[in-house]
Image: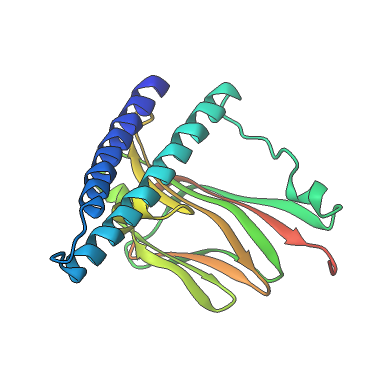
Amino acid sequence: MLIIGVRELEKKITEKRTKIASIKNRLLNVDKFTNIDELLVELIEQTEHSNELLVLSNRILFMMLKAQLGGEIPMIEGIEDIAGSRYRTRVIRVDNVKFSVLNRQERIFTIKEAGVISEIELISANTDSDNKNYKVRLVADDNIIYNDSWDDFESRTNHEADMTAFDDTNNNKYVLLFQDIVFDESCYLEVYESYATFDYINVKYHEKIGFL
């Protein structure tokens, strides 16, 4: 299953490299007749494809590392070691999360202190399309960091490094993942307009102890 997943990502990387090479060739043939607006559009496209290529490459490395380590990624030189034990790692996990017909909104967690979200996972079975029919709002220090539906997150996946949403056909799961959210006072996650049943929602964060 790992090989299939890597091959799919490698195919996408090849497509991105081809597009980047094509744009690069056009940019090398700029002359006085070149339309500046078209040139700017091509530069933006090249940047977007380059960013997507980086995200896909990182995803392959993560998959291979996770497979080598038996499905667990240890915190090597973690934040607790670097900060001299002035951060404490916490985990919040809720299993079998389902919303009632009358209340399709729920605040999953609230953290009222300074810290760093290492990872938020929302996992549901892909055997029912309703399991990706939900929206998520993530707020840090009263600023909305993310606020979108699963489908919209999936459409943005190749453009953003700290968020990913995809249909994991190897494990029959819908996956939504957020990483590296820094906050000084508070952070919370809400799921709303939800028709999904989640296998689990998992949050790993590092809370600040005292003053650094």
Screen quadrant of the N terminus:
top left
What x and y, as percent, mark residue 182?
A: 62, 64
What x and y, as percent, mark residue 161?
A: 46, 52
Left-right relation of 184 to 174? right
What x and y, as percent, mark residue 75?
A: 70, 40
- The residue closer to the viewer here, 107 or 72, is 72
Query: What residue sits 28% from the left and 31% below the top?
Result: 11
Q: Is residue 84 visible?
A: yes
**How are the colours assigned in the image?**
rainbow
What x and y, as percent, mark residue 134?
A: 33, 58
Query: What residue sits 85% from the left and 52% below the top?
Result: 85
Screen quadrant of the C terminus:
bottom right
Above-or-below relation of 103 to 85: below
Query: Quarter of the image holding residue 111?
Result: bottom right
Left-right relation of 74 to 105? right
Query: Quarter of the image holding residue 36?
Result: bottom left
Query: What residue sits 65% from the left and 60% below the top?
Result: 116
